[in-house]
Image (tube, helix red, strand yellow):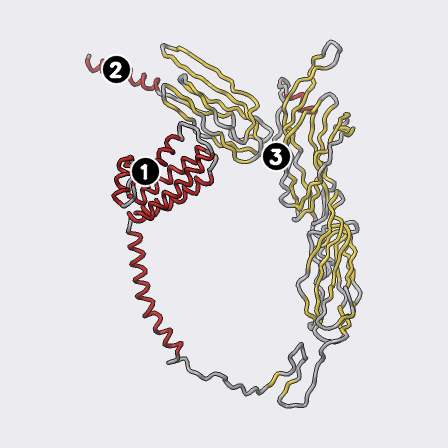
């Protein structure tokens, strides 16, 4: 009988303990969702609590909640309780987002939920619920991405234009970007819209209005099938309902929807290998080519500029100009590149130039051979090569090649002040002094012997200085006293700041001179120590009077003249005590 009673008591208390255990959890409707979907998160507890604090929901927009629900049940003699706070969230961007910890206080103890990681993907196709109030708005607003060319060549320009179509019965109150395309495999530049203009058009055969949100110029940098990522928007609309007012007009209702442009793909073609010229450096488009020299007649050591310029329409920022092949007797510097490019929906237009600085070293005629520039024209799908004219550089004055019959001289080109190089110079050393046993030798030998004792002496002094804890503390207090006296001078006119700095100055001065702490600074002790150290009675009285002024300033107002007088008095008294101690 006793064993049965013990068993029943154990079962009873175990059940009571299980019931009394607090549970506080976060539950989400899905852990992976599209950027155009919504998420429900419930914070559930099995006991009532106070001071519920939700997480910040960073990365989400709260589109609904908090909604609170309470459930109490009694089944087969067992009571249960549950309380739930619900939120509806809309992700702001793709990627890994986190729902942080929520907190609740139950019976004096704070409980926290475990953070939940949410994976947000690109936009997905949503199933339409005819009973959902969002459906009407979704069916009347569409975001479209129009690509000007679906099969461009590598580095050939094309555009993508994003248009927002809205039915005539629907009004748009505003929007914000949720997800923008990255254009990772393209050179891209957006063409800003100065102002949004509404156009009349049609969508799926029905009349619509539309606005151009963005135009982007793209130059593909890879071949093959490339994906243009979608643009996703969160839009506030006034959508029509099936109800009408007394005048027969449809009643609209506000709604917030997410629209996404469909993903577009382009097939980028490689440039043909057949017929590709050796002078081709990646230019794609339609160009003119020109080579000019700033001067063709000059003297040696003068400089001229040789400028190569490609003009036209195409990928001007994405190719290099050919390098000229010049005679070795011309000194050539690295080119200065200059791009004057305008970007529009038709692509890049303008010029790409390289300017070389050339300096001839001697007299003569120097031909600059024709320079070839090749590009690929997508309109004709052919390579084209342009060639410049030959340019003759005439150097009129300068050194020439000199000849000589002297067997001991080798004729070379005379440059500047140099004339001949002797093959047998017969050089003789001007200074035959030996380093060994010289003054420098003995000086270098004696230097370590002198420096080592000095280093040891300096090290001992430095260690003694560092080990002097008391002295360092006093020196620090003296330094602080000077600092606070300067702060007091800067605070003249501000009673609180002035007297606070002055009081700190006086206290640190006493620490440095009398080696006492602030807690020991009674007037009797200060007076006794100052006079024992050699301060006069008058100086001691003036110092104590300054301390009283700092105390009275906490309760009574003080004029600027009084502050100026106290500052001058403090400077004088500190100086007097320094002399007397």
Q: Quadrant of residue 112?
A: top left
Closer to the chain start, of discs 2 and 3, is: 2
Count of marks overlaid on the render: 3
Residue situated in front as seen by the camera: 564 or 252: 564
Q: Mark 2, residues whose alpha carbon is within 10 Å: few (<14), some, or many (≥20)?
A: few
For residue 9, which numbered disc appears in the image? Answer: 2
Q: Secondary structure at mark 1?
A: helix
Residue situated in front as seen by the camera: 516 or 458: 516
Q: Quadrant of residue 93?
A: top right
Q: Residue at x 70, y 18 (%)?
A: 240
Q: Residue at x 71, y 40 (%)?
A: 191
As measured in the structure, the alpha-carbon distance from the residue carrying label 2 to the one carrying label 3 is 61 Å
Q: Pointer 3: what residue?
A: 179
Viewed as shown, does residue 216 lie left or right of 516?
A: right
Q: Which is in the foreground here, disc 3 or disc 1?
A: 1
Q: Pointer 1: what residue?
A: 541
Closer to the chain start, of discs 3 and 1, is: 3
Q: Quadrant of residue 323?
A: bottom right
Residue situated in front as seen by the camera: 422 or 280: 422
Q: Mark 3, residues whose alpha carbon is within 10 Å: few (<14), some, or many (≥20)?
A: many
Q: Position of residue 126 (x, y in %)?
A: 62, 27
């Amino acid at each position: 009988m006793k064993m049965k009673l013990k068993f029943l008591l154990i079962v009873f208390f175990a059940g009571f303990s299980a019931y009394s255990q607090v549970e506080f959890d976060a539950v989400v409707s899905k852990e992976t969702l599209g950027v155009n979907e919504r998420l429900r998160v419930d914070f559930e507890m099995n006991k009532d609590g106070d001071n519920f604090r939700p997480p910040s929901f960073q990365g989400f927009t709260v589109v609904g909640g908090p909604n609170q629900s309470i459930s109490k049940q009694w089944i087969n003699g067992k009571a249960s309780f549950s309380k739930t706070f619900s939120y509806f969230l809309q992700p702001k961007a793709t990627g890994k987002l986190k729902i942080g910890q929520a907190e609740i206080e139950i019976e004096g103890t704070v409980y926290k939920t475990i953070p939940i990681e949410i994976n947000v993907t690109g936009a997905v196709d949503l199933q339409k619920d005819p009973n959902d109030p969002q459906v009407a708005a979704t069916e009347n607003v569409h975001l479209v991405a129009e690509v000007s060319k679906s099969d461009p060549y590598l580095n050939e320009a094309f555009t993508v234009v994003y248009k927002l179509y809205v039915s005539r019965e629907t009004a748009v109150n505003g929007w914000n970007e949720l997800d923008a395309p990255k254009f990772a495999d393209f050179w891209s530049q957006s063409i800003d819209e100065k102002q949004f203009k509404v156009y009349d058009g049609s969508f799926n055969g029905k009349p619509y209005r539309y606005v151009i949100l963005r135009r982007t110029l793209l130059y593909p940098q890879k071949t093959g099938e490339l994906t243009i990522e979608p643009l996703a928007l969160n839009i506030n609309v006034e959508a029509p309902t099936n109800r009408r007012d007394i005048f027969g007009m449809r009643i609209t209702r506000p709604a917030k929807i997410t629209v996404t442009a469909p993903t577009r793909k382009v097939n980028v073609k490689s440039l043909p290998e057949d017929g590709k010229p050796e002078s081709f450096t990646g230019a794609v488009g339609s160009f003119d080519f020109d080579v000019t020299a700033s001067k063709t007649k000059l003297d040696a050591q003068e400089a001229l500029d040789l400028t190569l310029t490609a003009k036209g329409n195409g990928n001007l920022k994405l190719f290099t100009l050919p390098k000229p092949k010049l005679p070795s007797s011309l000194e050539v510097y690295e080119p200065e590149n200059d791009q004057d490019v305008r970007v529009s929906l038709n692509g890049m237009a303008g010029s790409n130039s390289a300017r070389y600085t050339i300096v001839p070293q001697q007299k003569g005629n120097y031909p600059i051979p024709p320079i070839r520039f090749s590009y690929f024209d997508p309109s004709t799908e052919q390579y084209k090569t342009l060639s410049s004219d030959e340019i003759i550089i005439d150097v009129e004055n300068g050194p020439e090649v000199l000849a000589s019959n002297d067997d001991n001289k080798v004729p070379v080109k005379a440059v500047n002040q140099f004339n001949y190089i002797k093959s047998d110079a017969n050089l003789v050393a001007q200074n035959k002094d030996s380093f060994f046993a010289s003054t420098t030798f003995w000086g270098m030998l004696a230097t370590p012997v002198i420096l080592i004792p000095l280093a040891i002496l300096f090290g001992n002094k430095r260690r003694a200085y560092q080990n002097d804890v008391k002295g360092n503390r006093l020196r620090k207090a003296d330094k602080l006293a000077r600092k606070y006296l300067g702060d007091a001078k800067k605070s003249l006119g501000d009673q609180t700041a002035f007297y606070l700095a002055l009081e700190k100055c006086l206290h640190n001065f006493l620490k440095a001179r009398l080696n006492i702490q602030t807690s020991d600074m009674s007037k009797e002790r200060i007076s006794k120590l100052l006079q024992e150290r050699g301060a006069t009675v008058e100086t001691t009285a003036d110092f104590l009077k300054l301390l009283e002024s700092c105390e009275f300033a906490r309760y009574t107002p003080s004029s600027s003249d009084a502050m100026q007088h106290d500052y001058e008095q403090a400077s004088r008294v500190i100086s007097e005590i320094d002399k007397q101690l």
